[in-house]
Amino acid sequence: MDKDSHSQQVLHRLELHPLPRVLSRPHVLSEAPVLARAPESGVQSPKAVATASPAEIQEQAWQEGYQRGLIQGQEEGSRLGREEGFSDGRQEGLAAAEKESLQSVQKAIDAAQAELHKRETQLASLLKDIPARIADCLARAEDDMVALTHASVCRIVGSAAVAPDGVRQIVQQAMEQLRSGGQVVIRLHPADYQLFADAASLLPGREVSCVSDGQVALGGCLIDYPQGTLDARLETQLRQFTDLLLRVRNSAAADTAAEPSLPARQEENPS
């Protein structure tokens, strides 16, 4: 195939457009001076890139990516560290506050339990001492009653003894206790002796005489008879009455001590 036929075949396959196509002229760079700018750190100038080998370009790109990743990682790690530190600090603060609160509550509970135990011990001691305290109060009351009774009797008997009828009654009661025969001598206080001019009437059928004796107290008498002496003096009768009161009082105290005491309070074991 010759050259002409080949050209016709190419033109035969070419698609023609009805509108003409305008071809633009290539732009010419302005000759205005361009300010030189220093290449950024880590970025090579176009001239250096144009002269660098593919391995150097790859290494440079890896270094740039590594630096950017390192910076981003540091920033992200710092942010995450702050967040994690804040969270940990908050949790530790809450835990410390809760622990301190629980310790305060436990201290208050322990103090209340100690005070309650102290009060229970005091109450148990009081309950244990109640029977002894009651017995002591009763004993003191009985002593007071004995003293009061003795004083009252002494006052009554003493008032009656100084009266003429009282002295006669004391002597008459003493003479009634004599059952044996023989001579009877009644010794009286000089003031009382004047009241018994007729001593024989005190004990009919017996030989009775009265004598004045300064050793006998007013209101009393001593009666001598063959078997001995009957002491009817007022102080002797009052002493016997006092001994009787004391015997009754001691017997009552012994009966109280023999009674079973109240059972001791048993402490409950905490469950």
Image: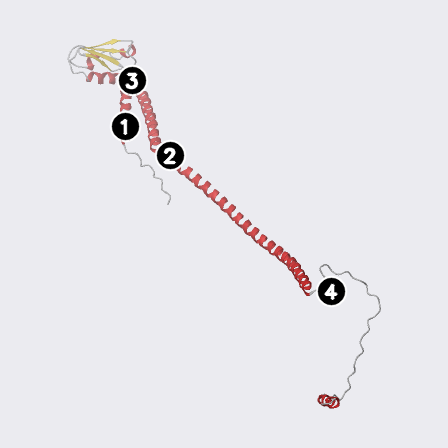
Pick whichever of labels 3 and 2 is earlier in the sequence: 2
**Residue 47 appears left or right of 137:** right
Question: What residue type is disc 3 on?
Answer: Ala
Between residue 81 and residue 153, name the one nearer to us: 81
Give the color scheme: rainbow, by chain, secondary structure or one colour: secondary structure
Q: Earlier in the sequence, mark 1 or mark 3?
A: 3
For disc 4, the marked residue is 51
Assign the C terminus to one quadrant of the image. Answer: top left
Q: Is residue 24 above or below residue 185?
A: below
What amino acid is at disc 4?
Answer: Thr
**Residue 176 in the image: above or below residue 83:** above
The reply to whether the C-beta atoms of the residues labelled 4 and 2 are less than 8 Å apart is: no
Q: Amino acid at mark 2?
A: Ser
Q: Between tags 2 and 1, which lies in front?
A: 2
Which residue is nearer to you in this view: 122 or 187?
122
- Separation of marks 4 and 3 at Cα, in angstroms: 159 Å
The correct choice, above or below, for 23 with respect to 111 in the image is below
First reached walking from the N terminus: tag 4 or tag 3: 4
